[in-house]
Image (cartoon, rainbow, N blue to C red):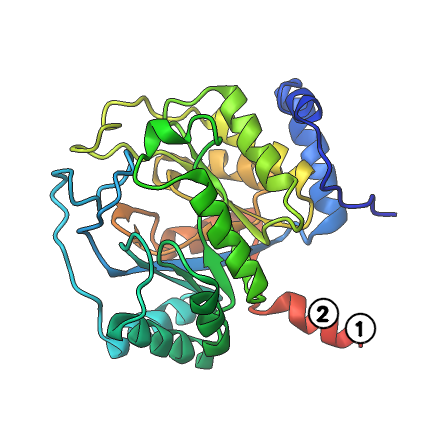
Amino acid sequence: MQQEIRRDWAIKEIQDLYNQPLLELVYRAATVHRKYNDTAEVQVCTLLSIKTGGCSEDCSYCPQAARYSTGIDVHALMKKEAVLEYAQKAKDAGSTRFCMGAAWRQVRDNKDFDHVLDMVRGVNELGMEVCCTLGMLTESQAQKLADAGLYAYNHNLDTSSEYYSEIITTRTYNDRLETLDNVRKAGVTVCCGGIIGLGETHEDRIKMLHTLSTMPEHPESVPINALVAIKGTPLENNPKVDIWDMVRMIATARILMPKSMVRLSAGRTDMSVAEQALCFMAGANSIFAGEKLLTTPNPSFEEDHVMFQLLGLKPREAFKEEKVAEEVL
């Protein structure tokens, strides 16, 4: 019998979960994971930067912020044909979700947005779950994306509300929450998580997990990113995130949000297969595949295929939730 999915977690409860001995935490998370999910199944996603660099935001970790000198070249919005060609290659390599990222502060109602809507329709026609991360959205823009066939929208909280202004000053935490609310109203699934290694405390991580796990609906996808320190950004000298911190975050997220896809995201290039296996055991059931995560390195499709074979993992099919719901009806 599955326990009821809770959205009323108290900070103290999350602290107690997060701070318990690591092996006990992993065992508990793995037990929850097995109850709610097919543990041999991992959602494979590909992320493409369709408009790179020149962003007006000041996110301290981001190489695409115009105010930092990081060696990232600014590229205008890609052509639809090139994006669909990349999406087809990702699909052929085993990806079932394709995410398009644009380095914008917010979406504007202009020709570029019309082109993105066209891309969304095109990727949707390939039979892939299509996701976008484009910055802040209004309710009407979220609805336009939904009407074009958008399946998911990524908009990370990054960290706790208390620490947020230490990392970003050009927008507020409430701006983030408002966009997520607009996405929900449009009936699009939510992809929302955070980054560890920004200089935050364990308490900040716990508070971020509290915000995510007490939303009216848990995000369907929760990316857990390890900071990739980029030369030229304010956080370029931050120490590498310890693997045990990643495992602890993933395990806690899995217990709090049993049915969410917990995504092992940025920082995977620095992890061995054994370390990634620990993350899967702790409840991660989604990865980004392909050579790049927007502008930072990522393991290749071939490397991931070898890892899947070794660990006995298989890619999750696209639109699985909807197919299961249809079978029930």
111 lies left or right of 224 = left
Secondary element under disc 1, as helix, strand or loop, is helix
Please determine whether, in this image, residue 110 is positioned above or below residue 244: below
Disc 2 + disc 1, Cβ < 8 Å: yes
Q: Residues within 10 Å of mark 1 (few under 14, many from 20)?
A: few
Q: Position of residue 74 (x, y in %)?
A: 14, 55
Residue 308: tell me if it is visible: no
Q: Which residue does the numbered mark 1 point to in the structure image?
A: 328
Secondary element under disc 2, as helix, strand or loop, is helix
Residue at position x 33%, y 35% in the image? 168
* Cα gap from disc 2 to disc 1, whole angstroms: 6 Å
Residue at position x 27%, y 72% in the image? 110
Quarter of the figure that contains the C terminus: bottom right
Q: Quadrant of residue 170?
A: top left
Between residues 287 and 224, which one lies in front from this camera angle?
224
Residue at position x 66%, y 43% in the image? 257
Q: Quadrant of residue 266?
A: top left
Please determine whether, in this image, residue 292 is positioned above or below residue 121: above
Q: Which residue does the numbered mark 2 point to in the structure image?
A: 324
Q: Position of residue 1 (x, y in %)?
A: 88, 47
Q: Which mark is residue 29?
A: none
Residue at position x 35%, y 41% in the image? 171
210 lies left or right of 76 = right
Q: Residues within 10 Å of mark 2 (few under 14, many from 20)?
A: few
Please determine whether, in this image, residue 205 is positioned above or below residue 282: above
Between residues 171 and 33, which one lies in front from this camera angle?
171
Amino acid identity at mark 2 = Val
Q: Quadrant of residue 211?
A: top right
Q: Position of residue 189 (x, y in %)?
A: 56, 61
Amino acid identity at mark 1 = Val
Residue 172: tell me if it is visible: yes
Between residues 171 and 195, which one lies in front from this camera angle?
171
